Image (cartoon, rainbow, N blue to C red):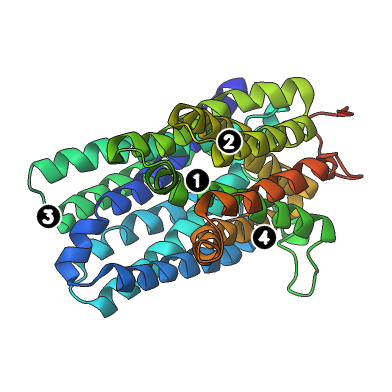
Amino acid sequence: MERQLRAARLATFAYFVLNGFLLGMWIVHIPSVEQRVGIDHATLGWLLLLLGAGAFAGMQAVGPLADRFGARKVVPLSAALCSAMVALPGLAGNVWSLGAALLALGVGNGCLDVSMNAHAVQVEHAYGRPVMSAFHATFSVGGVLAALLGARTLSWGWSPAATLLTVAALGLVVSALAAPALLPSGREPAAASAQAAPSPGRRTPRHIWMLAALALMIMLCEGVANDWSTLHLRRVLDAPPATAALAYGAFATAMTVGRLLADRVAGRFGPVAVLRYGASAAAVGLTAAALSDRVPVALVGWAVFGVGLSGCVPQLFSAAGHADRDAAGANVSRVAGLGYLGMLAGPAVIGPLTGLVPLNVTFFLPVAFCAVAACTAGILRPRPGASALVEADAM
């Protein structure tokens, strides 16, 4: 049993790495695809909304499917779908085909995102201790691998079509090889049919929507760092371009390291402490970055922001999945879906605000969201009927 559980965990790591790798390979080739199709940045920005819309739709569709048929069946199919769809943007020849390709890629990404998180909840339950944050850390590892490999293939002169087709084939192989190690649903067939996915008329509990609202706020904060950290150093502190790029590097590195360590912290002090003190640290870090007039202090602030946020979202996903094991997929899809909307909302919210106040002042909106998360962290305490990994959490 222990060997099977270890294999399932490794397989889950593989799917998280694959998801980050597939998205990273698309991101690396955005400039090349943009040039091939012949569109400007503004048009690309609108097309990227289709990627987000497809992801949200895929998330909402696959959650109930994972509950009905089991993540073991749904995860490999979702990974195969995402792998196949990543090739489409490289084959697009005009704005319409690119829009359709991004919509399809978004659907595949949304399906894989929710289904692999649903299986991660299942693995975490079997372990009986927090392991979710490490899965999210390996997603970032996949992005790093994509950046390295994408840079190499571009230096070799490979076309986006050739590279993304190769990546799609590799993704299909990984999807198939990792599938046998995934855990079964853990329910007998008769019980599974009797406790199938929630019926369309069953309402999502208010507790889950509260977790989803927190995910929206926290992931909006992550989106702000992704989109505005480099511009903050460049425009507000007048740092050279190479130095300004270190802001996002400090944030991303700190977040990855924090997620590798967050499971141990959650196991020792509980998920409430991870969210409460993590969000508090993030608020302090971003405040320091926003108020500082010195580049080194701002870089430290962005790093503290990343460490603080690192464990927050995995705790929310874990709490949603453990709230009701028979509806884990649907619940995770709600939290992940609203969280993803928050990630997309970062540039949409901060951008217009910069027309009213300086960029660094707009950062106090995500600071406020971090404060809300810290004050409401008690929502992560186990509810009656939920499968708790940490029984006592009074912090």
Query: At x 79% / y 47%, what residue is drawn?
Result: 323
Dot 2: what SS? Answer: helix
Q: Is residue 352 left or right of residue 323?
A: left
Q: Are marks 3 and 1 in contact (CB under 8 Å)?
A: no
Q: Is residue 50 left or right of residue 271?
A: left
Q: Position of residue 317 (x, y in %)?
A: 67, 46
Dot 1: what SS? Answer: helix
Quick check: 138 above or below 361?
above
Type of amino acid at the residue the image marks with label 4: Arg
Check residue 159 in the rendering and tell me which mark sits there, or answer none: 3
What residue sits right under mark 4 in the picture?
334
Measure the C-alpha gap from mark 2 to mark 1.
9 Å
Type of amino acid at the residue the image marks with label 3: Ser
Quick check: 389 above or below 95?
above
Measure the C-alpha gap from mark 1 to mark 4.
23 Å
Dot 4: what SS? Answer: helix
Rendered image quadrant of residue 105:
bottom left
What residue sits right under mark 1 in the picture?
225
Q: Are marks 2 and 1 in contact (CB under 8 Å)?
A: yes
Q: Position of residue 220 (x, y in %)?
A: 58, 53
Q: Are marks 2 and 4 in contact (CB under 8 Å)?
A: no
User: Dot 1: few (<14), some (14–19), or many (≥20) neighbours within 10 Å?
Assistant: many
Measure the C-alpha gap from mark 4 to mark 3.
37 Å
Q: Nearer the viewer, mark 2 or mark 4?
A: 2
What residue sits right under mark 2 in the picture?
305
Residue 121 visible in the picture: no
Type of amino acid at the residue the image marks with label 1: Ala
Type of amino acid at the residue the image marks with label 2: Phe
Q: Are marks 4 and 3 in contact (CB under 8 Å)?
A: no
